Image (cartoon, rainbow, N blue to C red):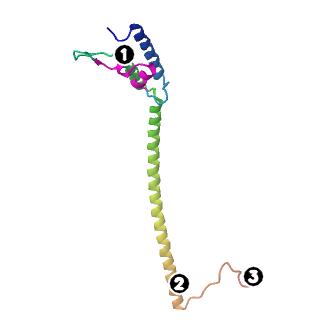
Amino acid sequence: MPRISEDAKSRNEAAIRAAMDRLLTGELPPGGKCDLKTLAAEAGVSRTAFYPKKARNGSARPGPYQHLGEEFERRLRALQEAGKVVDPRVAQIERLKTQVAKLTERVASRDAELAELTAFKTLAISRLAAQHDEITRLREQAAAAGNVRRLPDPRAAPYGSSS
């Protein structure tokens, strides 16, 4: 003798089918996924009703709504294979994974550029220091020789200018 009446079972099956249609069209409850757990909660039935049971003699027998659970998984798999994203969170996760990959690539590119600019800065500073040392050495050499005359400052007005 079944535990629930045929009338209650048919009402539950109708509720499961309605919940199945809602979930497969993307109408997920807050915090819910497109899975059997959410399907059972939305339909108001026990999740264990979607799985096989063990009879008293140890043999397996189908759960009361196992055929609906299999239908739900089959329809979900068909939608996924067709490229339709039923669960918006899955789409969000994929979008975020793509965004993370792009950002990681940008950071690596910027790190390489920063290393290149740092090397250039180091080289430029060392060249400037070498040039400064050379200029200082040449000035000291010219001052020691005593035979070099200083030219007038080009920024100053020339001799005899009327300005």
Q: Secondary structure at mark 2?
A: helix
User: From the viewer's perspective, is 8 left or right of 27?
Assistant: left
Residue ID for mark 1: 65
Residue at x 51% of width, y 86% of height: 140
Q: In which quadrant will I find the N terminus?
A: top left
Q: Residue furthest right?
A: 162
Measured along the vertical axis of the image, is residue 117 above or below residue 33? Answer: below
Measured along the vertical axis of the image, is residue 16 above or below residue 106? Answer: above
Residue 98 point in image, percent of width and height:
45, 39
Q: Residues within 10 Å of mark 3 (few under 14, many from 20)?
A: few
The boundaries of the magenta stretch are: 34-53
Residue at x 35% of width, y 12% of height: 3
Residue type, mark 3 in image: Ser
Numbered mark located on residue 130 in the image: none
User: From the viewer's perspective, is 148 left or right of 94?
Assistant: right
Q: Residues within 10 Å of mark 1 (few under 14, many from 20)?
A: many
Q: Secondary structure at mark 3?
A: loop
Residue type, mark 1 in image: Tyr
Tell me whether circle 2 and circle 1 mark residues in contact (CB < 8 Å): no
Q: On the image, which quarter does residue 85 sit in? A: top left
Distance, label 2 to label 1, CA atoms, is 98 Å
Residue ID for mark 2: 139
Measured along the vertical axis of the image, is residue 40 above or below residue 13? Answer: below
Q: Comparing marks 2 and 1, which lies closer to the viewer? A: 1
Residue ID for mark 3: 161
- Secondary structure character of the magenta stretch overall: helix
Q: Is residue 142 magenta?
A: no
Residue at x 46% of width, y 71% of height: 126
